[in-house]
């Protein structure tokens, strides 16, 4: 039953990922990416990472994709979307990506002796009990430095984004 | 029950779809969207390993990857807005002032 749900959500995630990278309309691509994020959140629930699934929807869909869609609507989409958006490197990139993907999947699964041990590796049943409590304990004890550094990083990104998007005040005044 | 190989294969496939998007598309916003796809693929892989090794390290790593992805998407979009303001085009092939 879990396997069936995994296949459904994995299939929709891969399908919408392909639609993201092949769509000429950038707003449609952003919306397909939102669908992909919802499917990935469902896969997190199958993996018993419920807090991460909620964080994924709140942050990725609710904040990052909202920012993307605001930006896409802010700039002039009509002009940007009718340019020829592919160049002649597409076949070479496709060959390279397929070869790399096949090689990576083979390396991930095999143990170089001819058998694939991870194909029969099943999850244990112990994880997930009081998961949120353990996660928050770990965040504030073992990974406290990472937590504080992430705050500094977000502050730097905030300041950088304001400075970059503000533009040149002199140019703006001249245009007005 | 879903074996580990399924999650790793899914992560690898989504990652390489993102790589194809970064290599092939010329629109700056689509390139940023493909980078977000790659982040998600890495997150799936890390959380799958965390489930199968009975620890929480993977989930914490995934939370910080989401945080870093938010910061990076913000700065990337600010750069895209500045680019668009400067030359009215989102084509990354035309951003070649440093090319010799």
Image (cartoon, rainbow, N blue to C red):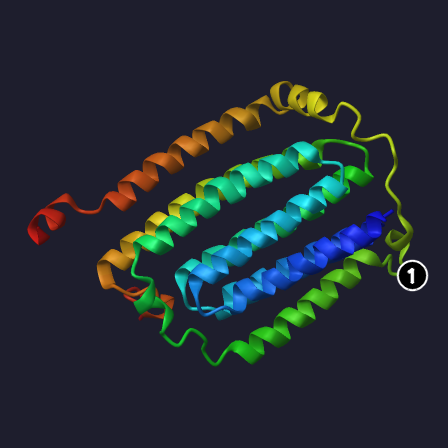
The residue under label 1 is A113
Local crowd size for mark 1, using a 10 Å CA cut-off: few (<14), some (14–19), many (≥20): few
Residue appearing at x 7%, y 51% in the figure: A174
Which chain does the residue under circle 1 lie in? A
Residue appearing at x 51%, y 67% in the figure: B23
Residue A45 placement: quadrant:
top right
Residue B38 in sight from this viewpoint: no
A60 over B37 or under it: above or below:
above
Residue A32 placement: quadrant:
bottom right
Residue B51: image location, x then y, percent: 78, 38
Residue appearing at x 43%, y 59% in the figure: A27
Q: Nearer the viewer, residue A170 or A99?
A: A170
Residue B23 in sight from this viewpoint: yes
Residue B15: image location, x then y, percent: 63, 58
Residue appearing at x 41%, y 51% in the figure: A69
A152 over A77 or under it: above or below:
above
B40 over A123 or under it: above or below:
below
Residue B58: image location, x then y, percent: 70, 37
Task: State the count of labels.
Answer: 1
Question: Going by the image, does B96 lie left or right of A56?
Answer: left
Which quarter of the rendered picture does the C terminus of chain B lie within? bottom left
Residue A107: image location, x then y, percent: 78, 60
Residue A104 placement: quadrant:
bottom right
Question: Going by the image, does B60 lie left or right of A131?
Answer: left
Question: Going by the image, does B70 lie left or right of A96?
Answer: left
Label 1 SS? loop
A77 over A127 or under it: above or below:
below
């Amino acid at each position: 039953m879990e396997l069936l749900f995994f296949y459904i959500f994995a299939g929709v995630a891969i399908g919408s990922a392909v639609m993201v990278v092949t769509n000429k309309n950038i707003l449609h691509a952003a919306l397909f990416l939102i669908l992909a994020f919802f499917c990935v959140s469902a896969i997190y629930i199958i993996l018993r990472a419920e807090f991460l699934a909620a964080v994924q929807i709140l942050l990725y869909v609710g904040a990052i994709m909202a920012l993307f869609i605001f930006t896409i609507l802010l700039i002039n989409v009509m002009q940007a979307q009718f340019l020829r958006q592919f160049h002649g490197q597409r076949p070479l990139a496709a060959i390279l990506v397929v070869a790399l993907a096949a090689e990576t999947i083979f390396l991930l699964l095999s143990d170089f002796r001819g058998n694939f041990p991870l194909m029969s590796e099943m999850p244990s049943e112990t994880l997930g009990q009081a998961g949120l409590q353990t996660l928050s304990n770990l965040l504030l004890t073992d990974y406290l430095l990472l937590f504080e550094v992430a705050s500094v990083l977000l502050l730097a990104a905030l300041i950088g984004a304001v400075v970059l998007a503000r533009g040149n005040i002199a140019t703006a005044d001249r245009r007005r | 029950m879903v074996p580990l190989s399924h999650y790793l294969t899914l992560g690898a496939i989504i990652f390489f779809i993102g790589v194809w998007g970064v290599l092939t598309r010329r629109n700056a916003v689509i390139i940023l969207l493909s980078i977000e796809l790659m982040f998600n693929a890495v997150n799936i892989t890390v959380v799958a390993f965390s489930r199968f090794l009975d620890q929480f390290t993977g989930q914490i790593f995934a939370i910080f990857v989401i945080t870093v992805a938010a910061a990076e998407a913000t700065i990337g979009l600010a750069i895209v807005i500045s680019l668009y303001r400067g030359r009215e085009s989102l084509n990354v092939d035309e951003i070649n002032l440093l090319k010799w």
